[in-house]
Amino acid sequence: MINTLNRLFAPTQTNFASNGCKGELPLCFFMHIPRCGGTSVEHALRKIYPNAAGLQAAASFRATQALYPEASSSEKDFHMFKLRESLLLYHMGWHIPLVHGHYGFSEPAYREFGTKYRFITVLRDPVERFISLYFYNTFKSQNYAKINMDLNTFIHSEEGRSQGRQYVKFIGGVAEGEDYKSNKAIDRALGNLEKFSAVGVLERLDAFMVTIQSVFGHRICIRHENKNPKPRIEWEESVSEDLRNEVRSLCGPDIEVYNHALTFCKNAPVIFLDDTGELRR
């Protein structure tokens, strides 16, 4: 029975070895924070990592609903991230070359596998991320995390307020009953950023690609994927400066984390992309 389960759940290494990558690329964990260009980064990384394990966010949500049907929204969110942490540890335990998805930072994963895996992530201006997430989740076709309220109502909802501290939660790691806008939680996130081998921002993907080449010894080309179903030109004028200021106030905790992330690329050389998205030399 145990051997059967091992065959069912053991990740295959065939492609990894046959592509000549073994011993050349370090193991990689990409923390994909929603609406920060993560899908584009994942697609680029998968081109150099033939064998990878992703995370189906909606499936982890449904599993949590089944396990904790009576829990509150905040309790379910905590349990969902702990479930994802277990999956992260499972994949790292198998030494999957690339593990990526909407995982939060895991201290046990870093303690056990931090010397084997390179931790990387990409952030985005928090105000832009908040607004992009609202329109993406409002107009997307899937039901998971669907938003059914206008922007002003969303900003003043608990769900909306929580979006102003997602960097603190993802990078700082989840804790039961944690106040993610507290100085303690923010400081933990700032400290954890220092444990990453590569931290990028969407506004300077050029610098992030240079860092990846330095850390991994391979170039990646990041193209625009998972585009917002509501084009920016169709909603930009509807977001007043007053609403932006309210969002900026909500995002205070994440702005602190983002500003620290900017220090990782401020000294990187400015490079340019050609019309195909390749680095210009």
Image: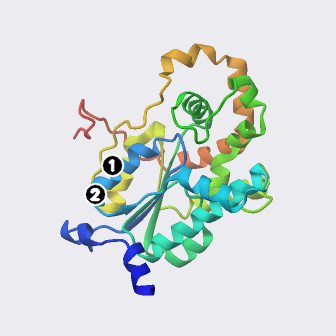
Query: Could you tell me which residue is drawn at 50 percent across and 73 percent down?
Result: 90
Q: How many neighbours does mark 2 have within 10 angstroms: few (below 14), some (14-19), or many (20 or more)?
A: some
Tag 1 residue: 44
Query: In terms of secondary structure, where does tag 1 sit?
Result: helix
User: Of the residues shown, which amino acid type is indicated by label 1?
Assistant: Ala
Between the residue at mark 2 and the residue at mark 1, the CA separation in whole angstroms equals 7 Å
Query: Could you tell me which residue is drawn at 19 percent across and 69 percent down?
Result: 18
> In the figure, is residue 2 to the left or right of 210?
right
- Image quadrant for the N terminus? bottom left
Tag 2 residue: 48
Q: Indicate whether 36 appears above or below 119.
A: above
Tag of residue 136: none
Q: Toward which corner of the image does residue 106 lie, by quadrant?
A: bottom right
Q: Name the one closer to the observer, 76 or 183.
A: 76
How far from the left and from the top, in percent, is residue 269? 37, 44
Give the total of numbered labels.
2
Q: Toward which corner of the image does residue 214 lie, by quadrant?
A: bottom left
How far from the left and from the top, in percent, is residue 226? 42, 37
User: Contact (CB < 8 A) between labels 2 and 1?
Assistant: yes
Query: Could you tell me which residue is drawn at 40 percent across and 81 percent down?
Result: 4
Query: Could you tell me which residue is drawn at 45 percent across and 86 percent down?
Result: 2
Q: Name the one closer to the observer, 133 or 244.
A: 133
> In the figure, is residue 113 to the left or right of 27?
right
- Whether residue 166 appears in this view of the structure is yes
Query: In terms of secondary structure, where does tag 2 sit?
Result: helix
User: Of the residues shown, which amino acid type is indicated by label 2?
Assistant: Ile
